[in-house]
Image (cartoon, rainbow, N blue to C red):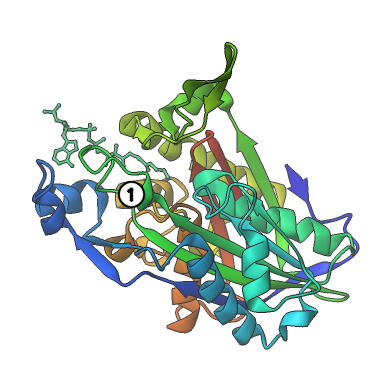
Amino acid sequence: MGETNLSQFGITFKGSGSYIPKQILTNEDLSRIVDTSDKWIKTRTGISKRRISSIHESVCQMGYEAALRAMEMANWSPDTIDLILLATSTPNDLFGSAPRIQSKLGAKNATAFDLTAACSGFLFSLITGAQYLQNGSFKRALIIGADQLSSYVNWLDRGSCILFGDGAGALAIEASDDINNFYGFQMKTDGERGGFLNLSVCGSEEEIIDDIKVNKGKFSNITMNGQEVYKFAVREVPIVIDNLLKQLNYNSSEVDWLLLHQANQRILDAVGERLNIPKEKVLSNLNNYGNTSAGTIPLMLDESIRNKKVKQNDLIATSGFGAGLSWGAALFRWG
Ligand code: UT7
């Protein structure tokens, strides 16, 4: 649980950007791989198609493109950026991919590192970045969410392959002496329920010498208990948003936009209903992209800003949720 009351500096939102890969995989395409149909997928998830990154559209590439666009909207030169956080579960390099994005951007004065919290990763990174700005350590930060889960999806598992796609988004946030548009947040994890959604190492024993065996690293495909994740999301997400609004003395009727992690249209609808937020205020682009994990929130926000749906000073309640299990919420004004 967090509050911004004690902080030294406020936060302002200066820019957004996103990138979606070129290849499109439709529900019709999927119905040729597994026993499913366009009708079933649309009715149960709201998804019609998703983007799949090619070998040239890695997390670094997508994250870079999204960050570049956010930087351009903010009108920042690369050498003025202090911090780059990359939320991802599918890095190019397990030792860290954010520094590669830093180098491509030419942000030579920035510190860059990765943060992994699956579909909550962007929210957790935004909150983390905000701490450095609020306490005066840094002034300008790029917060990136990028994932290519397509590399780890079991394309023969109809219970999960229908949901996921690839994409990236980024926000440019800045510390301010006199304005604060980031009002507060809540973050939660529950490892007890972690087995519902995993992209785990499936080690195999290999002898290196004289009976000394190493656990050779390799990742298995994504495994998911869809029903349990669904139940978790529709129960916990309204509670965490409601608690945050209460903590900050806001009412859900004051929220201009509900910006949820794009997982399933039925989850979006159920959370909106429980919070009494009308459907028109619940942002959704699931139809086009499916679940892009850490990419969904900044991708959705960037689209809404660029098509002028979300305007300066609009109040946004956001929530990320997913593997870990992990979830949380934040309340902010755009601008
Ligand atoms: O970031 C978080 C990521 N994860 C999630 O958000 C997952 C949340 N969960 C979900 O979105 C939903 O649980 C799914 C979309 C994954 C599944 O929908 P559901 O309404 O929970 O379906 P179900 O698992 O209860 O399955 C209902 C039926 C089953 O058949 P029977 O046993 O009733 O004969 C499944 O075998 O639908 C069948 N089914 C399918 N049929 C056609 C499951 N997947 C498919 C499919 N096409 N793709």
| Quadrant hosting residue 69 | bottom right
Is 220 on the left-hand or right-hand side of 45?
Answer: right
Residue furthest out toward the top = 211
Residue behind label 1 places its C-beta within 8 angstroms of ligand 1: yes
**What x and y, as percent, mark residue 115?**
64, 49
Q: Assign the C terminus to one quadrant of the image.
A: bottom right
Query: Going by the picture, which residue comes out furthest to the front?
Result: 210
Viewer-proximal residue among 24 and 314? 24
Question: What residue is pinned by disc 1?
Answer: 264
Please count the marks in the image.
Answer: 1
Asked whether residue 318 is in view, the answer is yes
Position of 79 relative to 9 (above/below): below
Image quadrant in which you'd find residue 176: bottom right
In the depicted structure, whether residue 270 falls above or below residue 48: above
Residue sitting at 54 percent across and 39 percent down? 239
For residue 249, say whether it is visible.
Answer: no
Q: Residue at x 57, y 26 (%)?
A: 191
Residue 164 placement, left or right of 137: left
- Tell me what residue is drawn at x 26 percent, y 45 percent: 161
Locate residue 315, reporting x and y percent. 59, 68
Looking at the rendered structure, the secondary structure element under dot 1 is loop
Observer-nearest residue: 104 or 49?
104
Ligand 1 quadrant in view: top left
| Residue 85 located left or right of residue 163 | right
Q: Quadrant of the N terminus?
A: top right
Please rate how many residues cluster around mark 1, counting C-alpha atoms within 10 Å: few if below 14, some from 14 to 19, many from 20: many
Query: What percent of the width, then of the height, locates residue 234?
Result: 41, 39
x then y, percent, for residue 8:
91, 63
